[in-house]
Image (cartoon, rainbow, N blue to C red):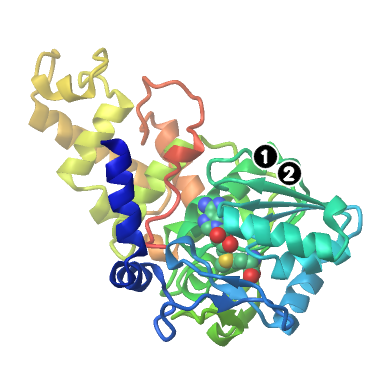
Amino acid sequence: MIRRRENIATNLLHSRFLRHFIDRCIHTNSGRKNKPENIGDSGEEVKIRLYKSRGQHLLTNPRVLDSIVRVSDIKSDDTVLEIGPGTGNLTLKLLEASNNVFAIEIDNRMVDSLRKRVAAAGVQERLNIINGDALKTEFPQFNLVVANIPYNISSPLLAKLVYGAAANPFRSATLLLQKEFARRLLAKPGDSEYNRLAINMNLMADVEFVMDVSKRDFVPCPKVDSSVVKLYPKTEIPDVNLEEWWAFTRTCFNNKNKTLGATFKQKRKLTELMKLSRVEGFCQDSNDLDECESGSQPGLEVGDRISSFRARVAGVLESGGFVDKRPAKLSHNDLLHLLSLFNDDGIYFRDQAKGSDSCSIAELDFDDGLL
Ligand SMILES: C[S@@+](CC[C@H](N)C(=O)[O-])C[C@H]1O[C@@H](n2cnc3c(N)ncnc32)[C@H](O)[C@@H]1O
């Protein structure tokens, strides 16, 4: 029975009609469907079907590749980490500059192609390929990152890199990113693109713009332009609980143009903070946050407790001059100061009954953007 099903499936796959249909579905280069791309950067024949779902837009302009390597300032004894090497257009250039490169690639076909190219160039000894998902794989020890990353995992990947830098310090990361994402990352207080991603990144790393890269420098040509940025992890990181910080920045940037006075007047927000902070007479002893409003606690009625807590929060904002300030114009240092004022007053943005362990990479709440 199983064999018969397999035969039917094989026959179907070999049917010309179905093959054509599948090709149309999976091939992403809208202009040239059903045709694997020649993706070598210097005329050599390397043919692989490229998948948009894996961000497979390969950088083929040798001048741009050279510029990326040059700005990365690689020393021969650096251990370079590349994420998403593809068929190796950038990897081969990295191997000219460094004796030790780690490359993490999810797609087996890319890994095969990369192995062949590197062996043909006689530099396979210097390359360690990790065939896996960069978000799930433990990073090796490295001191430099240079990569044209898959854009669809930009946020979690950057979070993994910079938030992992405390345990695995590195000098810099030169990254090719979607231009719009790079602009959000580089935005400063007061810029229209200023957002929670920039705030959270600035806590851990300095970001520098390097250059824009045209979509025409990729195969297949993506819909968007790109930019190269360089990240420098900070050596001194503020002593703040990251889960608390992410929850706090989420609250503030929920509406970045609203004054903080208005944001912290909302009943829903105040109730949540009262629960999380285990405010006296409100959820102090309960382990279940949902039971907090049951009214079983002695003292004031729930409505009165919220009014008194609202006045307390307003007092904290006033003490730091934040009532009329808008998050869109505040630096991460301003926000750190405000968070410390809240915490000094016993007001917290994460459940105080939870342990202080930092959360895992899978729980990273780093960015509200769509990328
Ligand atoms: C934008 S391409 C860059 C390829 C190559 N570096 C270049 O510049 O030509 C991104 C590469 O990342 C790989 N990739 C996608 N998702 C990945 C993941 N989660 N972990 C590791 N590699 C991934 C893709 O298969 C693809 O080869």
Q: On screen, 40 above or below 371?
A: below
Where the C terminus falls, by quadrant? bottom left
Does residue 317 lie above or below 40 as drawn? Answer: above
Q: Residue at x 42, y 54 (%)?
A: 367
Q: Quadrant of residue 83?
A: bottom right
Relative horizontal placement of residue 29, taking residue 141 as reference (left or right): left
Image spot of residue 119 (x, y percent): 82, 59
Q: Nearer the viewer, residue 130 or 187?
A: 130
Q: Which quarter of the picture shows residue 93?
A: bottom right
Tell me what residue is drawn at x 59 percent, y 44 percent. Answer: 163
Q: Amino acid at mark 1?
A: Ala
Q: Name the residue located 17 percent from the left edge and 24 percent from the top edge.
A: 290
- Count of numbered marks: 2
Left or right, 251 with respect to 175, comes to left
For residue 335, side relative to residue 2 (left or right) = right
Quadrant in which ligand 1 is drawn? bottom right
Q: Is residue 89 above or below residue 74?
A: below
Q: Which residue is mark 1?
A: 166
Quadrant of the frame with the N terminus: top left
